[in-house]
Amino acid sequence: PLVLILNGPNLNLLGQRQPEIYGRETLADVDRDCAALGQSLGLDTSLRQSNHEGQIVDWIHEARDRAQAIVINPGALTHTSVAILDALNAFEGPVIEVHISNVHKRESFRHHSYVSLRADGIIVGCGTQGYQLALRRIAALLGYSAA
Ligand code: DQA
C-alpha cells in the first residue's frame, strides 16, 4: 500500500523558517524518517510539497487510483481551501491531517480547518514527529500493523 504525504505552502522551508515554531528538521529529514518507518510498517510512502493549491488538488485526484491513504499538512491552505476539502471528499481511503505546531495556541485564524471536516484523525503540535504518528495510525486503520 502507498501513502501520499502531502505538504502545502512554505513547508519547503521547513528547518529554516521560524525554527522556534517548526523546529530544525527539514522536509528531507521527514521524508527519510517516514520512508524508514513506512518500510517497517509495510507501507510505501511518497512525500511531496507544493506552494500551489491546484497542484495539491491534482495530487489528491491522482491518489484516487494510486494511493490507499493520505497524510496531509496543507500549511496555510488548511484555513482557506474549500478546494482541498472537496478533493479529499472525493478520496475514499483514510486521511490524517498533521500540523507541526499547536495551531490552537496560535492566532485565532489558525483555529479553523476546512480539512478537519474530512480528516479521520488530526495530529497537532507534535512537531515533525506528527508525520510518523500519522503513519502509525494509517497502518492501524489499513490493518497492516498492530501499531
Ligand atoms: C502548519 C500550521 C499553519 O497554520 C501554517 O500556515 C503552516 C504550518 C503547521 O504545520 O503547524 O504553514 O500547518
Image (cartoon, rainbow, N blue to C red):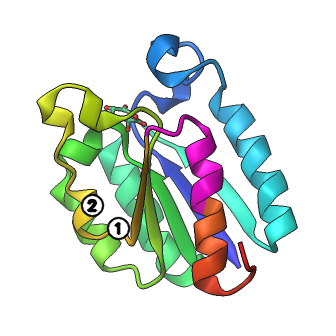
Q: Which mark is residue 116?
A: 2
Q: Position of residue 78 (x, y in %)?
A: 27, 46
Left or right, 123 with respect to 141, comes to left
**Which residue is drawn at the image coordinates 44% and 19% (left, top)?**
21
Report the residue marked by disc 1: 119
As displayed, is residue 47 above or below residue 76? below
Left or right, 91 with respect to 38, comes to left
* Residue 94 shown in magenta: no
Can residue 17 be seen in the rendering of this structure? no
As displayed, is residue 121 above or below residue 20? below
Left or right, 97 with respect to 22, comes to left
Determine crowd level at label 2: few under 14, some 14-19, many 20+ residues with C-alpha closer than 10 A.
some
As displayed, is residue 28 above or below residue 141? above
* Residue 133 shown in magenta: yes
- Looking at the image, which is closer to me, 142 or 56? 142
Extent of the magenta region: 125-134
The C terminus sits in image quarter: bottom right
**Which residue is drawn at the image coordinates 68% and 39% (left, top)?**
30
- Name the amino acid, label 1: Ala
Left or right, 20 with respect to 91, comes to right
